[in-house]
Image (cartoon, rainbow, N blue to C red):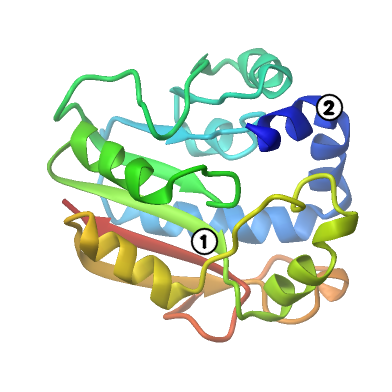
């Protein structure tokens, strides 16, 4: 649980990052929203590992889980019902949600178990949506190179789109669809970027897959 300790200790810095990289954040948010809109209206879902609610709130997600207490406090102030739990042991009944959202997979202790839990709580035909920094992308390589100096990435695991695709299939998911954003160097992103289909160009990839 080293990641949880880091996020608890650096919650202020976590929030500050989004403020200092507003166009990066808004571009990521736009890509996730585009994928969620494909699911149609009146859907009920959760965010797993929601952090401070930076994505859940503007996406209209009302509940989810977050193991870091300091981030839960901020998420609750944003009006989100957030429980203290981990992705590998979701406190929800089987076949319950229309979608499950993950934004980054960096802090998961066991990604296979986390995906299995997401599959369990989804309704038949429900969808998993995952936004992540692609391991082999420009920003992914930058984060990996800086990991020893980072409060957030030191113990992180980065994944390629191909690896995520394989893991989703192993968990039983199908009909994967990918879009991407964050084109160029991190510090050069100074406007909202429109997502493109597929992966391989942008550093932030959002995949949607069906149970």
Residue 107 seen in the current view: yes
Q: Is residue 105 above or below residue 43?
A: below
Residue 41 seen in the current view: no
Q: In the rendered image, which quarter is residue 126 located in? A: top left
- Give how far across and how far down residue 98 sits, in percent: 23, 37
How would you rate the neighbour count of disc 1 (Cα within 10 Å): few for under 14, some for 14-19, many for 20 or more?
A: many
Residue receiving disc 2: 9
- Give how far across and how far down residue 50 sits, in percent: 56, 33
In front of the other: 179 or 103 = 103
x 69%, y 35%: residue: 2
* Left/right of residue 39 with respect to residue 111 in the rendered view: left
In front of the other: 24 or 1 = 1
Q: Residue furthest left?
A: 124
In front of the other: 94 or 42 = 94
Q: Earlier in the sequence, mark 2 or mark 1?
A: 2
Q: In the rendered image, which quarter is residue 166 located in? A: bottom left
x 89%, y 50%: residue: 20
Mark 2 or mark 1, whichever is nearer to me? 2
Any mark on residue 2, and which? none
- Give how far across and how far down residue 136 sits, in percent: 61, 80
x 51%, y 61%: residue: 31
Q: Is residue 17 above or below residue 63?
A: below
Residue receiving disc 1: 31
x 29%, y 36%: residue: 117
- Give how far across and how far down residue 116 sits, in percent: 26, 43
């Amino acid at each position: 649980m080293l990641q949880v300790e880091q996020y608890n200790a650096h919650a202020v810095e976590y929030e500050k990052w989004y403020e200092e990289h507003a166009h990066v954040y808004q571009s990521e948010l736009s890509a996730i929203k585009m994928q969620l809109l494909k699911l149609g209206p009146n859907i009920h879902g959760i965010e797993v590992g929601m952090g401070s609610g930076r994505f859940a709130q503007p996406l209209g997600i009302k509940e989810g889980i977050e193991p870091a207490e300091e981030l839960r406090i901020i998420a609750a102030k944003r009006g989100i019902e957030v429980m203290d739990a981990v992705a590998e042991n979701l406190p929800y009944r089987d076949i319950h949600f229309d979608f499950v959202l993950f934004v980054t997979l960096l802090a998961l202790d066991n990604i296979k178990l986390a995906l299995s839990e997401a599959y369990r709580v989804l309704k038949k035909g429900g969808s998993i949506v995952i936004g992540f920094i692609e391991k082999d992308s420009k920003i992914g390589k930058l984060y990996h190179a800086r990991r020893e100096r980072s409060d957030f990435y030191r113990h992180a695991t980065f994944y390629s789109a191909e690896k995520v695709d394989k893991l989703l299939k192993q968990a039983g998911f199908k009909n994967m669809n990918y879009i991407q954003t964050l084109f160029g160097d991190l510090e050069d992103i100074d406007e909202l970027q429109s997502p493109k289909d597929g992966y391989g160009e942008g550093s932030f990839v959002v995949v949607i897959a069906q149970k």
